[in-house]
Image (cartoon, rainbow, N blue to C red):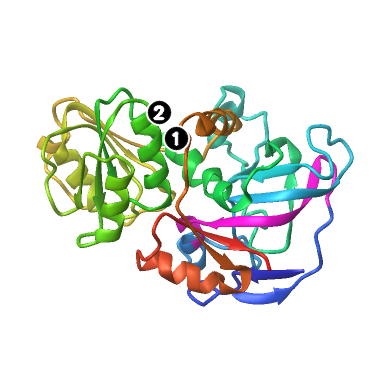
Amino acid sequence: MRAMVVEHPGRPLAARELPAPEPGPDEILVRVLACGVCRTDLHLADGELALPGRPVVPGHEIVGEVVRAGPGVTRLAPGQLAGIAWLGWACGTCRFCASGRENLCERARFTGWQRDGGYAEYAVADARFAFPLPPGTDPVATAPLLCAGLIGHRAWRMAGEARRLGIFGFGAAGHILAQVARHAGQEVLAFTRPGDEGAQRLARDLGAAWAGGSDAPPPALLDAAVIFAPVGALVPAALSAVAPGGTVVCAGIHMSDIPAFPYALLWGERVLRSVANLTRADGEAFLALAPQVPVRCAVTPFPLAAANEALELLRAGRIEGAAVLVPE
């Protein structure tokens, strides 16, 4: 099968012909129909997430058709569509799993990192961690929901009750969360890269009450903010924009260092927290909510062989909404 592989951090992904994987017990083999391009893939390619001692096929926003099911699989059958997300496996027995926090599992394995992902024609996944998708699902439009949507939804819930919500970084996750927040009756303010008129226009089209650069103060204090951009300097900026009692949620798996800031920005019972990974319950809840909104993803499709181009455009902030790889 054709695959795009991270072999050496800091270098472009390599195009390789690899043997098609075989599903083991409790696993499914899927033919990849679409795979979203996530900033986490950039972190892996750049070496900000360490390779697990071998080359890796990245990609964890996978929509695929089940080709074969291994022994023990009952929830998915050949011919069905499946969604495969970041959390690829959890032990089920550690103190975190036992308390409903499998997202913090001490031995978790993640798709497109410890487990090969969807930048390929085929992928294997643990069926217990895959999501059945209804017939007629649009693979390209659905792929970004499996990370940008799921993590955004978890971050949104962690932000608590908020009448006025700020979103810092208006890419794949931001444009999905804006729709969810507007559906819930919240006022959305979008903070983009300074001068990014395309992202600001998309935010306004999706119902944002205000859109501007992250270097600009909002027209009113926020009740909560979610930071998707991996820029530590946005943390004090978001805290300064949040009213007393508000919450700032850092939603990325990696972020540049947070600069020192005065205690006064945190004082007033403001809360600063992170979100790590997701649980299967998160996935089920969001995939049930998305059609009710309904969430509409702005997507730019790329052939699998153009994965490096898609990653570079993402790095430069030149993707409006989400990028999705489609095996030819």
**Amino acid residing under circle 1:** His
Location of residue 227 with respect to 102 vertically, above or below: below
Left or right side of 91 for 258: left
Q: Which residue is mark 2?
A: 157
Q: Which of 254/221 is in front?
A: 221
Per the model, the C-alpha gap separating discs 1 and 2 is: 6 Å
Residue 34 within the segment the image draws in magenta: yes
Query: Residue visible at 63% across and 50% down?
Result: 139
Q: Regarding mark 2 in the picture, which secondary structure is present there? A: helix
* Picture quarter with the C terminus: bottom right
Marker count (numbered) = 2
Q: Quadrant of residue 164?
A: top left
Q: Position of residue 252 (x, y in %)?
A: 41, 48
* Picture quarter with the N terminus: bottom right
Q: Position of residue 118 (x, y in %)?
A: 65, 58
Q: Position of residue 23 (x, y in %)?
A: 83, 50
Query: Residue visible at 31% across and 25% down?
Result: 185
Q: Which residues are magenta?
A: 23-41
Residue 16 within the segment the image draws in magenta: no
Q: Which of 34/258 is in front?
A: 34
Q: Which residue is mark 1?
A: 153
Do callouts 1 and 2 mark residues in contact (Cβ within 8 Å)? yes
Q: Position of residue 62 (x, y in %)?
A: 63, 51
Query: Residue visible at 33% across and 30% down?
Result: 159
Residue 122 visible in rendering? yes
Q: Residues within 10 Å of mark 2 (few under 14, many from 20)?
A: few
Left or right side of 253 for 114: right
Q: Which of 22/121 is in front?
A: 121
Query: Residue visible at 36% across and 66% down?
Result: 318
